[in-house]
Amino acid sequence: MTSYRVGLLVPSSNTTMETEVPEVLRRVAARSDNRFTFHSSRMRMKTVTAEELAAMNADADRAAVELADAAVDVMAYACLVAIMSQGRGVHRDIEERLTQTAKDAGDPVDVVSSAGALVAGLHHLGARKVSIVTPYMKPLTALVADYIEAEGIEVQDAVSLEVDDNLAVGRLDQAQLPEIAERLDTRGVNAVVLSACVQMPSLQAIPAAEKAVGGLPVITASTATSWQLLNSLGAHTPVPGAGELFKH
Protein backbone atom coordinates (compact mmCIF):
# COMPACT_ATOMS: atom_id res chain seq x y z
CA MET A 1 0.00 0.00 0.00
CA THR A 2 1.23 3.48 -0.91
CA SER A 3 0.17 6.55 1.05
CA TYR A 4 0.17 10.04 -0.40
CA ARG A 5 -0.31 13.46 1.16
CA VAL A 6 -2.38 15.71 -1.11
CA GLY A 7 -2.21 19.47 -0.61
CA LEU A 8 -4.91 21.94 -1.63
CA LEU A 9 -4.52 25.71 -1.83
CA VAL A 10 -8.09 27.00 -1.55
CA PRO A 11 -9.97 30.28 -1.14
CA SER A 12 -10.86 31.01 2.48
CA SER A 13 -14.57 30.72 1.65
CA ASN A 14 -14.25 27.43 -0.23
CA THR A 15 -16.50 24.65 1.05
CA THR A 16 -16.57 22.28 -1.94
CA MET A 17 -13.07 21.39 -3.11
CA GLU A 18 -12.17 19.78 0.21
CA THR A 19 -15.26 17.59 -0.23
CA GLU A 20 -15.23 16.61 -3.90
CA VAL A 21 -11.52 15.91 -4.43
CA PRO A 22 -11.33 13.66 -1.34
CA GLU A 23 -14.47 11.84 -2.53
CA VAL A 24 -12.97 11.11 -5.95
CA LEU A 25 -9.74 9.92 -4.36
CA ARG A 26 -11.70 7.86 -1.83
CA ARG A 27 -13.20 6.00 -4.80
CA VAL A 28 -9.70 5.56 -6.23
CA ALA A 29 -8.47 4.17 -2.88
CA ALA A 30 -11.35 1.68 -2.83
CA ARG A 31 -10.16 0.27 -6.16
CA SER A 32 -6.39 0.38 -5.65
CA ASP A 33 -3.61 -0.01 -3.10
CA ASN A 34 -3.25 3.78 -2.81
CA ARG A 35 -4.33 5.80 0.21
CA PHE A 36 -4.58 9.57 0.52
CA THR A 37 -4.64 12.20 3.24
CA PHE A 38 -5.63 15.82 2.58
CA HIS A 39 -4.07 19.02 3.82
CA SER A 40 -5.14 22.59 3.02
CA SER A 41 -3.92 26.14 3.22
CA ARG A 42 -6.30 29.05 2.69
CA MET A 43 -6.09 32.44 0.97
CA ARG A 44 -8.59 35.20 1.76
CA MET A 45 -11.45 35.53 -0.75
CA LYS A 46 -15.17 35.90 -0.07
CA THR A 47 -16.57 37.64 -3.15
CA VAL A 48 -15.70 36.55 -6.68
CA THR A 49 -14.46 39.88 -8.01
CA ALA A 50 -11.37 40.69 -10.05
CA GLU A 51 -9.91 42.63 -7.11
CA GLU A 52 -10.30 39.83 -4.55
CA LEU A 53 -9.06 37.22 -7.01
CA ALA A 54 -5.91 39.25 -7.73
CA ALA A 55 -5.29 39.70 -3.99
CA MET A 56 -5.68 35.97 -3.45
CA ASN A 57 -3.13 35.21 -6.18
CA ALA A 58 -0.69 37.55 -4.46
CA ASP A 59 -1.18 35.64 -1.20
CA ALA A 60 -0.63 32.23 -2.79
CA ASP A 61 3.11 32.11 -2.10
CA ARG A 62 2.55 32.44 1.65
CA ALA A 63 -0.08 29.68 1.57
CA ALA A 64 2.15 27.42 -0.54
CA VAL A 65 5.04 27.72 1.93
CA GLU A 66 2.77 26.84 4.84
CA LEU A 67 1.34 23.84 2.99
CA ALA A 68 4.78 22.68 1.87
CA ASP A 69 5.73 22.46 5.56
CA ALA A 70 3.48 19.39 5.72
CA ALA A 71 5.74 17.66 3.15
CA VAL A 72 2.84 17.00 0.80
CA ASP A 73 3.52 14.83 -2.26
CA VAL A 74 1.59 17.09 -4.64
CA MET A 75 -0.14 20.44 -4.34
CA ALA A 76 -3.04 21.95 -6.29
CA TYR A 77 -3.93 25.60 -6.56
CA ALA A 78 -7.64 24.91 -6.35
CA CYS A 79 -9.28 28.06 -7.68
CA LEU A 80 -9.87 28.08 -11.42
CA VAL A 81 -11.16 31.62 -11.96
CA ALA A 82 -8.47 33.22 -9.79
CA ILE A 83 -6.00 32.14 -12.46
CA MET A 84 -8.12 32.44 -15.60
CA SER A 85 -9.14 36.01 -14.74
CA GLN A 86 -5.50 37.12 -14.76
CA GLY A 87 -4.81 36.61 -18.46
CA ARG A 88 -4.23 33.92 -21.04
CA GLY A 89 -1.91 31.08 -20.16
CA VAL A 90 -1.26 32.36 -16.63
CA HIS A 91 -1.63 28.91 -15.07
CA ARG A 92 1.80 27.97 -16.39
CA ASP A 93 3.45 30.96 -14.71
CA ILE A 94 1.64 30.44 -11.41
CA GLU A 95 2.36 26.70 -11.28
CA GLU A 96 6.04 27.39 -11.97
CA ARG A 97 6.15 30.22 -9.42
CA LEU A 98 4.57 28.19 -6.63
CA THR A 99 6.71 25.15 -7.41
CA GLN A 100 9.79 27.35 -7.04
CA THR A 101 8.38 28.93 -3.87
CA ALA A 102 7.97 25.53 -2.23
CA LYS A 103 11.44 24.48 -3.37
CA ASP A 104 12.99 27.66 -1.97
CA ALA A 105 11.25 26.94 1.34
CA GLY A 106 13.03 23.58 1.49
CA ASP A 107 10.11 21.31 0.54
CA PRO A 108 10.13 20.61 -3.23
CA VAL A 109 6.73 19.55 -4.56
CA ASP A 110 4.95 19.55 -7.91
CA VAL A 111 2.25 22.23 -8.03
CA VAL A 112 -0.68 21.83 -10.40
CA SER A 113 -3.72 24.08 -10.78
CA SER A 114 -7.42 23.67 -11.44
CA ALA A 115 -7.12 26.01 -14.42
CA GLY A 116 -4.32 23.99 -15.98
CA ALA A 117 -6.05 20.72 -15.09
CA LEU A 118 -9.27 21.69 -16.86
CA VAL A 119 -7.38 22.63 -20.02
CA ALA A 120 -5.25 19.47 -19.86
CA GLY A 121 -8.31 17.32 -19.23
CA LEU A 122 -10.17 18.74 -22.21
CA HIS A 123 -7.14 18.14 -24.45
CA HIS A 124 -6.86 14.60 -23.07
CA LEU A 125 -10.47 14.01 -24.15
CA GLY A 126 -9.69 15.39 -27.60
CA ALA A 127 -12.22 18.19 -27.15
CA ARG A 128 -12.04 20.88 -29.83
CA LYS A 129 -15.36 22.54 -28.98
CA VAL A 130 -17.14 22.69 -25.61
CA SER A 131 -20.08 24.28 -23.83
CA ILE A 132 -19.72 25.34 -20.20
CA VAL A 133 -21.69 26.11 -17.03
CA THR A 134 -20.32 28.62 -14.53
CA PRO A 135 -21.65 30.26 -11.36
CA TYR A 136 -19.90 33.53 -12.26
CA MET A 137 -21.14 36.91 -13.33
CA LYS A 138 -21.14 37.16 -17.13
CA PRO A 139 -17.92 39.23 -17.42
CA LEU A 140 -15.96 36.58 -15.49
CA THR A 141 -17.53 33.80 -17.55
CA ALA A 142 -16.35 35.65 -20.66
CA LEU A 143 -12.79 35.67 -19.27
CA VAL A 144 -12.98 31.93 -18.60
CA ALA A 145 -14.27 31.26 -22.12
CA ASP A 146 -11.51 33.42 -23.60
CA TYR A 147 -8.90 31.56 -21.56
CA ILE A 148 -10.14 28.18 -22.77
CA GLU A 149 -10.26 29.38 -26.37
CA ALA A 150 -6.68 30.69 -26.09
CA GLU A 151 -5.73 27.08 -25.32
CA GLY A 152 -7.15 25.96 -28.67
CA ILE A 153 -10.63 24.86 -27.56
CA GLU A 154 -13.67 26.70 -28.88
CA VAL A 155 -16.42 27.58 -26.39
CA GLN A 156 -19.70 27.32 -28.25
CA ASP A 157 -22.08 28.23 -25.42
CA ALA A 158 -21.98 29.23 -21.75
CA VAL A 159 -24.53 29.52 -18.96
CA SER A 160 -23.68 32.04 -16.20
CA LEU A 161 -25.61 31.57 -12.96
CA GLU A 162 -24.41 35.04 -11.83
CA VAL A 163 -23.63 34.35 -8.18
CA ASP A 164 -20.74 36.43 -6.87
CA ASP A 165 -20.83 35.46 -3.18
CA ASN A 166 -18.49 32.47 -2.93
CA LEU A 167 -20.29 30.92 0.05
CA ALA A 168 -23.55 31.11 -1.91
CA VAL A 169 -21.86 29.36 -4.83
CA GLY A 170 -21.03 26.49 -2.48
CA ARG A 171 -24.70 26.23 -1.52
CA LEU A 172 -26.00 25.92 -5.10
CA ASP A 173 -28.10 22.79 -5.62
CA GLN A 174 -26.17 20.45 -7.90
CA ALA A 175 -29.36 18.48 -8.56
CA GLN A 176 -30.33 21.35 -10.89
CA LEU A 177 -27.20 21.02 -13.00
CA PRO A 178 -28.49 18.35 -15.41
CA GLU A 179 -31.43 20.56 -16.37
CA ILE A 180 -29.11 23.56 -16.69
CA ALA A 181 -26.74 21.55 -18.88
CA GLU A 182 -29.65 20.47 -21.03
CA ARG A 183 -30.24 24.16 -21.90
CA LEU A 184 -26.76 24.48 -23.38
CA ASP A 185 -26.26 24.56 -27.13
CA THR A 186 -24.27 21.35 -27.56
CA ARG A 187 -24.51 20.97 -31.34
CA GLY A 188 -21.13 19.78 -32.55
CA VAL A 189 -19.41 19.99 -29.16
CA ASN A 190 -17.04 17.29 -27.94
CA ALA A 191 -17.51 17.79 -24.18
CA VAL A 192 -19.50 19.70 -21.58
CA VAL A 193 -17.86 21.49 -18.64
CA LEU A 194 -20.58 21.01 -16.04
CA SER A 195 -18.90 23.25 -13.46
CA ALA A 196 -16.11 25.60 -14.50
CA CYS A 197 -15.60 26.43 -10.83
CA VAL A 198 -14.11 24.47 -7.95
CA GLN A 199 -16.67 25.88 -5.52
CA MET A 200 -19.86 24.96 -7.42
CA PRO A 201 -20.91 21.45 -6.29
CA SER A 202 -21.21 19.08 -9.23
CA LEU A 203 -19.72 15.62 -8.58
CA GLN A 204 -22.96 13.85 -7.70
CA ALA A 205 -24.72 15.37 -10.72
CA ILE A 206 -22.31 14.02 -13.34
CA PRO A 207 -24.11 10.75 -14.24
CA ALA A 208 -27.48 12.50 -14.69
CA ALA A 209 -25.81 15.34 -16.60
CA GLU A 210 -24.21 12.86 -19.01
CA LYS A 211 -27.67 11.54 -19.82
CA ALA A 212 -29.09 15.07 -20.12
CA VAL A 213 -26.53 16.02 -22.77
CA GLY A 214 -26.97 12.85 -24.79
CA GLY A 215 -23.94 10.95 -23.55
CA LEU A 216 -21.37 13.65 -24.27
CA PRO A 217 -18.25 13.55 -22.09
CA VAL A 218 -18.76 15.63 -18.93
CA ILE A 219 -15.91 17.21 -16.99
CA THR A 220 -15.79 19.57 -14.01
CA ALA A 221 -13.13 21.70 -12.36
CA SER A 222 -12.96 19.31 -9.42
CA THR A 223 -12.77 16.09 -11.46
CA ALA A 224 -10.10 17.62 -13.68
CA THR A 225 -8.11 18.68 -10.62
CA SER A 226 -8.45 15.20 -9.09
CA TRP A 227 -7.32 13.64 -12.39
CA GLN A 228 -4.30 15.93 -12.62
CA LEU A 229 -3.29 15.30 -9.00
CA LEU A 230 -3.43 11.56 -9.59
CA ASN A 231 -1.44 11.87 -12.82
CA SER A 232 1.26 13.76 -10.94
CA LEU A 233 1.40 10.95 -8.38
CA GLY A 234 1.24 8.18 -11.00
CA ALA A 235 -1.83 6.87 -9.21
CA HIS A 236 -4.70 7.28 -11.66
CA THR A 237 -7.38 4.57 -11.43
CA PRO A 238 -10.74 4.38 -13.27
CA VAL A 239 -13.69 4.92 -10.92
CA PRO A 240 -17.45 5.16 -11.45
CA GLY A 241 -19.54 8.31 -11.43
CA ALA A 242 -16.71 10.82 -11.91
CA GLY A 243 -17.08 11.48 -15.60
CA GLU A 244 -15.13 10.72 -18.74
CA LEU A 245 -11.65 11.36 -17.28
CA PHE A 246 -12.17 8.44 -14.88
CA LYS A 247 -13.74 5.92 -17.24
CA HIS A 248 -10.44 4.53 -18.52
Image (spheres, rainbow, N blue to C red):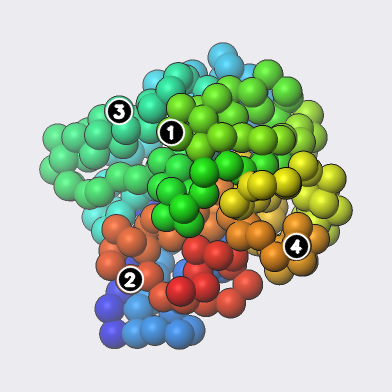
**Place of residue 135 in the rendered image (x, y in percent of width and height, measured from the top left):** 72, 36
**Residue flagged by tag 1: what amino acid is it?**
Glu
Residue 160 appearing in the image = yes
**Residue 41 vs residue 215, the one in the foreground:** 215
- Please give the residue where the numbered disc 2 appears in the rendered image: 235
Q: Give how far apart the Cα atoms at labels 3 and 4 are.
A: 37 Å
Q: Residue at x 66, y 60 (%)?
A: 216
Would you place residue 184 above or below residue 56 in this image? below
**Place of residue 110 in the rendered image (x, y in percent of width and height, measured from the top left):** 25, 48
Q: Give how far apart the Cα atoms at labels 2 and 3 are.
A: 25 Å
The numbered mark, 3 or 4, whose residue comes first in the sequence reads 3
Q: Are marks 3 and 4 in contact (CB under 8 Å)?
A: no
Q: Are marks 2 and 4 in contact (CB under 8 Å)?
A: no
- Please give the residue where the numbered disc 4 appears in the rendered image: 214
| Residue 88, quarter of picture | top left
- Please, what secondary structure does the residue beneath circle 4 have? loop
Q: Quadrant of the N terminus?
A: bottom left
**Residue flagged by tag 2: what amino acid is it?**
Ala
Would you place residue 63 above or below residue 240 in this image? above
**Place of residue 85 in the rendered image (x, y in percent of width and height, measured from the top left):** 52, 23
**Place of residue 2 in the rendered image (x, y in percent of width and height, measured from the top left):** 28, 78
| Residue 204, quarter of picture | bottom right
Res. 187 mark: none
Crowdedness near tag 3: few (<14), some (14–19) or many (≥20) residues, C-alpha within 10 Å? few
Q: Are marks 3 and 1 in contact (CB under 8 Å)?
A: no
- Please, what secondary structure does the residue beneath circle 2 have? loop
